[in-house]
Amino acid sequence: MADQKKLFSQFYDQYIERIYRFVFFKVNSHEIAEDLTSETFTRTWEVFQRQNIKNPSAFLYTTAKNLVIDYYRQKGRMQVISAENASIIDPAQDLEEKMKLDSDIEYIRKALIGLKEDYQNVIIWHYLENLPISEVANLLDRTEENTRVLLHRALQSLKQKISLG
Amino acid sequence: MTDQELIGKIKELNQIKPKKEWVLLTKEQILGKEAERVLFPFSKPVYAGLFLLLFLTGLFETSQAALPGELLYPLKKITEKGRTLFASEEKKPGVNLELANRRLEELVKIAEANQVKKLAPAVNEFKESLSQAAKNLTETQKITDVKIIVQKTQELAKNKEIAERILATKIETEELDNALSKIVSEQIKDLENRTLTEKGEEALTKAKEYFESENYDLALIEILNIVQENQKE
């Protein structure tokens, strides 16, 4: 049990920031991101004690993704958050974020939020979290070639959103 | 913007991070749940007493590292309160000054870790303990152990300097200064009525100068030198 706990503690340290960021991009609120990330790790720990999780990264991202879907389903919210809404939803947190990030990066964050889900995920996983194409392909349940095409399209779509302002 | 520039900007989004406190607390909450289940084998009466003892000992020990604003902090204060209650009247000023020092060390730790939320409770704790130390110094009829007062006020001055540097703000210690002023003044009066060696007289002159310039800790060091010089004879 102690070994299991130690191992999970390592997973936690390795993935907590990534999962938090991933959820934050979806819900655009630090408070909700904290709740859903915490639930993601709680559920993963429950499964982890019963069975061997071969790919913790995939398991965590899938659990987080499902919890975000449940969150929007339960609340009857629209999952697509427009860039304008981003600052209205959580003004205090947004202000805090603005202080941390320069306006250029804040601009990219808002553009990223406006992308469709697959585009958003592929950019977050590959460019932001540095996951190799093979792992992104696995997370998206696509072939590697297909994932590369998706990545290219996602980047162009992001570029277009930025240029349109 | 080129693709490479855009990718570079995307990578900078990793500046978005959860609060450190939340990360630690959540980990504790998740893995702590398991600890509760592990307790069951100890539910037999034969183990219960032993376990409770171990648990309380561990809890008290852990609480000693707690910082203001944390769950175990009140426990730490209780154990410290016990120390002051059982200390003799002569030792109380030293113990209280040590506690004020601890509060200042906590403040430094919090400021260094940039734990903004804990800053206000830490400042209040320090003010309170300093006030208590000053009150105790003023109320004590006669300071018998000047050495410990010197040692503790020096530590306090050093910690205060560190805290002021990190917080980029001045920390008021007026109450303590007033209490020290009273002590130094009384000690000087007392020494003036005694026969001192040449060295002792020199130290007393210095002590008076420091007293005039409100450098009470330095004045106390001179007083301590005189006391130690007298004890040798």
Image: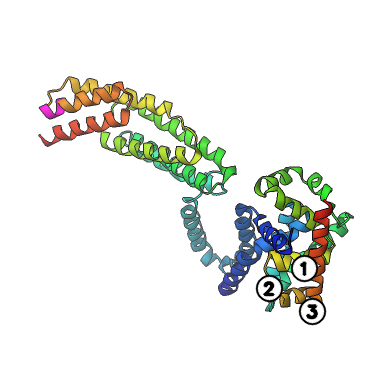
Q: In which chain is the residue bearing label 2?
A: A
Circle 2 or circle 3, nearest the eye = 3
**Residue, x 30% and y 39% (percent of image)?**
B151
Point out the tag, 2 or 1, that comes first from the N-terminus: 2
Q: Which residue is mark 1?
A: A122
Q: Secondary structure at mark 1?
A: helix
Q: Which residue is mark 2?
A: A56
Circle 2 or circle 1, nearest the eye = 1
Return the x and y of residue A141 as percentages of the image width and height: 80, 76
Q: Is residue A163 left or right of residue B119?
A: right
Point out the tag, 3 or 1, that comes first from the N-terminus: 1
The coloring applied to the image is rainbow
Viewport quadrant of the C terminus of chain B: top left
Q: Nearer the viewer, residue B171 or B188?
A: B171
Whole-angstrom CA distance, mark 3 to mark 1, is: 13 Å
Q: In which image quadrant can residue A65 be found? A: bottom right
Return the x and y of residue B150 as percentages of the image width and height: 29, 35
Viewport quadrant of the N terminus of chain B: bottom right
Q: Is residue B198 magenta?
A: yes
The segment highlighted magenta reads: B197-201
Return the x and y of residue A47 as percentages of the image width and height: 71, 72
**Residue, x 67% and y 79% (percent of image)?**
A52
**What amino acid type is highlighted by mark number 2?**
Pro
Q: Nearer the viewer, residue B57 or B42?
A: B57
2 and 3 marks on the same chain: yes
Q: Which mark is residue B24?
A: none
* Residue A142 at least partly seen: no
